[in-house]
């Protein structure tokens, strides 16, 4: 398997909701960057988060474990997480591992924001 360019993560706050963009593969190599970014968001007292998967094409079991850690933490904080822009492959993976039981999935940022009651 050919290794993608370095994993990148950044966020943009839209109407008070952080939208986190990940670029590259979600694996054990990206675990620390994802958790560090997430912890920075929670320190700013954001309760709800949107994860945007537009620029991701691969996730493995370590990546899924990272997402489960975030879902568990945000749920413990009485917050909510929404996934947007999943490819059909990612959608199937999320269904198979059961993440769709805990996370709502929408087509884009606007739909995700609307699910939080935000008009954009």
Image: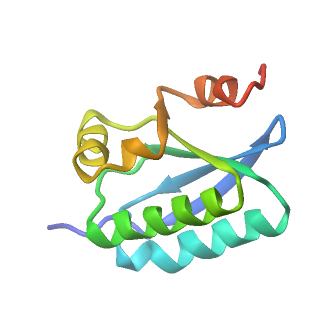
Q: Residue furthest left?
A: 1
Q: Nearer the viewer, residue 91 or 53?
A: 91
In which quadrant of the rendered view does residue 14 lie? Answer: top right
The residue at the point 45 percent across, 62 percent down is 67
Model colouring: rainbow
Image location of residue 75, percent across then percent down: 61, 57
Image location of residue 62, percent across then percent down: 32, 73
The residue at the point 84 percent across, 41 percent down is 16
Q: Nearer the viewer, residue 68 or 8?
A: 68
In which quadrant of the rendered view does residue 6 lie? Answer: bottom left
Is residue 104 placed above or below 12 in the rendered structure? above
The residue at the point 48 percent across, 43 percent down is 103
- Tag count in the figure? 0
Is residue 7 placed above or below 55 in the rendered structure? below
Rendered-image quadrant of the C terminus: top right
Q: Nearer the viewer, residue 59 or 5?
A: 59
Q: Is residue 10 left or right of residue 53?
A: right
Image location of residue 15, percent across then percent down: 83, 34
Q: Is residue 116 left or right of residue 2?
A: right
Rendered-image quadrant of the N terminus: bottom left
Image location of residue 52, percent across then percent down: 53, 44
Q: Nearer the viewer, residue 66 or 103?
A: 103
Q: Is residue 4 left or right of residue 18?
A: left
């Amino acid at each position: 398997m050919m290794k993608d360019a370095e994993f990148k993560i950044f966020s943009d706050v839209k109407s008070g909701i952080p939208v986190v963009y990940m670029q590259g593969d979600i694996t054990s190599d990206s675990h620390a960057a994802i958790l560090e970014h997430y912890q920075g968001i929670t320190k700013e007292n954001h309760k709800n988060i949107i994860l945007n998967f537009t620029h991701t094409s691969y996730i493995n079991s370590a990546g899924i474990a990272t997402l489960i850690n975030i879902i568990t933490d945000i749920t413990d904080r009485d917050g909510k997480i929404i996934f947007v822009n999943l490819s059909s492959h990612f959608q199937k993976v999320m269904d198979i591992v059961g993440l769709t039981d805990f996370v709502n999935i929408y087509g884009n940022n606007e739909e995700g924001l609307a699910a939080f009651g935000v008009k954009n």
